[in-house]
Amino acid sequence: MSLFSRRPAETPSGPFRFRISEIYQIPTRGIVVTGTVTDGTVQVGANAVVQLPGGARQVVVTRIETARRKRQSAEAGAEAGLYLSGLSTGDIPTVPGGDGQQQDNNALRGVEVTSA
């Protein structure tokens, strides 16, 4: 190993906790929640649990974005968007609006996503 060679940064693994601020349905990508990693490190591929008002739901983190850039992980303190498989539009509360019901992007504010 050369004096100036770089070792890949190690990403800590272990339990994580993420607090949702908003939730969106993106037509080509699915459900994304935005918020803050409050504990630990979340990684792409992580199994997680969303504590929905109707009960816990098992999900998988399929993509992470911070500052509009795709990442493999996000650590405590980071504001991020987590793309989750395992949630559907039926899991997102709605409110009256327009000609019917519309998704309430703030309905899950404060809900936690945690390590499974």
Image (cartoon, rainbow, N blue to C red):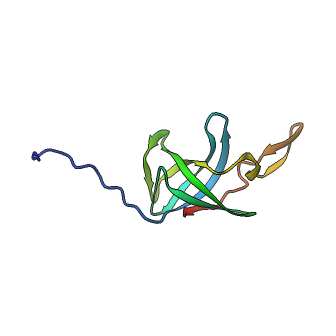
Q: Seen in the image, is 95 located left or right of residue 17? A: right
Q: Is residue 12 above or below residue 86?
A: below
The total of numbered circles placed on residues is 0
Task: Compare residues 59 and 38 and report the one nearer the observer.
Answer: 59
Q: Residue 67's x, y, as percent?
A: 48, 42
Task: Compare residues 81 and 42 and report the one nearer the observer.
Answer: 42
Q: Quadrant of residue 12?
A: bottom left
From the image, which quarter does the C terminus lie in? bottom right
- Seen from this angle, which residue lies furthest top? 28
Q: Quadrant of residue 55?
A: bottom right
Query: Going 69% across and 56% down the picture, which residue do you hit?
Result: 108
Query: Going 75% across and 63% down the picture, which residue do you hit?
Result: 54
Query: Going 50% across and 55% down the picture, which residue do you hit?
Result: 46
Q: Residue 10's x, y, as percent?
A: 31, 55
Q: Residue 16's x, y, as percent?
A: 49, 63
Q: Is residue 73 above or below residue 19?
A: above
Q: Seen in the image, is 17 located left or right of residue 40? A: right
Q: Residue 93's x, y, as percent?
A: 77, 52
- Seen from this angle, which residue lies furthest right? 99
Query: Going 89% across and 37% down the picture, which residue do you hit?
Result: 99
Q: Is residue 93 above or below residue 54?
A: above
